[in-house]
Image (cartoon, rainbow, N blue to C red):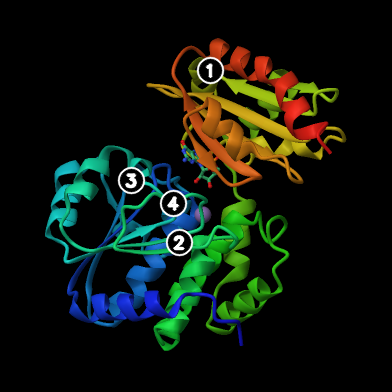
């Protein structure tokens, strides 16, 4: 049905590790998105049906919308229950690391993850994975961790254990990381997998509504304000920038996930090649970048904002004021143009 991409050696090793494991912990990256939550809960669902005792840890809370995914209430939020999350990692006999490529992406849980003695299985699609896992199944060419995970489950002959709930969760990750199959989704086999998930009962309509067409009134107004009042566009530089301070976020009763889609919007303006959104958090400025074509926002985020990600979607952090962060971005625009836009 689909080509065999997951290495035989990894399938064999993972299969042995699973056979020996009873208590399994699953952990994903901080700021969990639909791919992180979807892959974690889908894996837990499948392994649960195999009789394994599985718990999923999120380093910090997921958005209220993601919390409506099936099984999300069972997620252990390490921000609220740090000791319990640490115990789960310590006592597990197998740990899955989903949708991240280096321990620091689990933020406050990084030390506990590294200290845990259980074998670690990484399943991920971010470039340049660090060498921390016992088995590393890393496919940066694939659109979503959920897509990689589906292939892994196929190879483990666990397809019959994917029920409608697991199928919905896997599709949630694929839809999240491709903007509803709009970008990063030209691989024909991705659609074969989507078809298979639909065959297994994935609730596509509910997912589109939940992931792309549900927004609170205050969030809608916050996004409108950000675009109307805070958007800076420099088509000569191919760049767009939006910043939101704590005060502005509070005015619109910001809650997690409310600005998820904002950074994509300026890319619709002709001449905008890449877009940056900066949100003032309590401890740092959260940076999100998106681009089109071969403009590598992951390089910019890695070089200047201590982060990373994919060529067209990346993020990072800035330690300083929001204005300093914005100035740092503006100061990079000419260099970015020379390096990534004019080079062609
Ligand atoms: P977002 O802008 O939605 O937070 O993140 C977009 C992409 O960049 C995601 O694939 C995410 O994994 C990655 N990313 C976001 N923030 C960071 C960060 O601080 N460090 C790294 N390494 N990747 C990030
Ligand atoms: Mn992902």
Q: Nearer the viewer, mark 4 or mark 2?
A: 4
Instruction: Determine which of the numbered discs, if any, sits on residue 245 in the image.
Output: 1
Could you say whether the residue bearing mark 2 is in a helix, strand or loop?
A: helix
Instruction: Determine which of the numbered discs, if any, sits on residue 344 in the image.
Output: none
Q: Residue at x 27, y 42 (%)?
A: 110
Q: In the image, is 22 to the left or to the right of 274?
A: left
Label 1 vs 3, first from the N-terminus: 3
Give how far apart the Cα atoms at labels 4 and 3 are. 10 Å
Q: Position of residue 55 (x, y in %)?
A: 25, 62
Give how far apart the Cα atoms at labels 4 and 2 are. 21 Å
User: Would you say the beta carbon of the disc 4 residue lies within 8 angstroms of ligand 1?
Assistant: no
Label 1 vs 4, first from the N-terminus: 4
Q: Position of residue 186 (x, y in %)?
A: 73, 64
Instruction: Determine which of the numbered discs, if any, sits on residue 38 in the image.
Output: 2
Q: Nearer the viewer, mark 1 or mark 4?
A: 4
Q: Residue at x 44, y 46 (%)?
A: 64
Give how far apart the Cα atoms at labels 1 and 3 are. 29 Å
Dot 3 crowding, Cα within 10 Å, few <14, some 14–19, many 20+ = many
Which residue is the site of mark 3? 103
Could you say whether the residue bearing mark 4 is in a helix, strand or loop?
A: loop
Which residue is the site of mark 4? 129
Q: In the image, is 206 to the left or to the right of 238?
A: left
Quadrant including the C terminus: top right
Could you say whether the residue bearing mark 1 is in a helix, strand or loop?
A: loop
Label 2 vs 1, first from the N-terminus: 2
Label 4 vs 2, first from the N-terminus: 2
């Amino acid at each position: 049905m689909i080509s065999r991409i997951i290495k035989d050696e990894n399938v064999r090793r993972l299969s042995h590790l699973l056979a020996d494991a009873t208590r399994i912990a699953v952990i994903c990256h901080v700021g969990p998105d639909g791919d992180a939550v979807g892959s974690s809960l889908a894996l837990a669902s499948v392994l649960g049906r195999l009789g394994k005792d599985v718990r999923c840890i999120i380093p910090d809370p997921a958005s209220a919308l993601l919390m409506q995914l099936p099984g999300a209430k069972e997620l252990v939020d390490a921000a609220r229950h740090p000791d319990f999350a640490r115990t789960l990692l310590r006592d597990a006999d197998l740990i899955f690391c989903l949708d991240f490529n280096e321990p620091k992406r689990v933020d406050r849980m990084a030390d506990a993850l590294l200290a845990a003695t259980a074998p670690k299985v990484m399943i991920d699609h971010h470039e340049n994975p660090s060498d921390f896992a016992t088995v590393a199944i890393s496919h940066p060419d694939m659109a979503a961790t959920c897509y990689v995970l589906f292939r892994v489950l196929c190879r483990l002959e666990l397809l019959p254990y994917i029920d409608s709930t697991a199928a919905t969760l896997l599709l949630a990750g694929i839809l999240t990381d491709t903007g509803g199959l709009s970008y990063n989704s030209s691989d024909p086999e991705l659609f074969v997998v989507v078809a298979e998930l639909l065959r297994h009962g994935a609730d596509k309509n509910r997912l589109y509504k939940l992931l792309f067409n549900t927004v609170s009134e205050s969030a809608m107004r916050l996004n409108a304000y950000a675009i109307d009042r805070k958007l800076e566009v420099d088509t000569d530089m191919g760049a767009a920038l939006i910043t939101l301070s704590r005060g502005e976020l509070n005015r619109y009763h910001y809650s997690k996930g409310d600005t998820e889609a904002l950074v994509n919007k300026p890319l619709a303006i002709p001449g905008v090649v890449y877009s940056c959104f900066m949100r003032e958090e309590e401890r740092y400025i959260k940076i999100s970048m998106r681009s089109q074509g071969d403009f590598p926002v992951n390089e910019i985020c890695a070089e200047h904002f201590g982060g990373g990600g994919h060529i067209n979607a990346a993020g990072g952090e800035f330690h300083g004021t929001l204005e300093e962060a914005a100035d740092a971005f503006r100061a990079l625009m000419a260099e970015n143009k020379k390096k990534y836009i004019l080079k062609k």
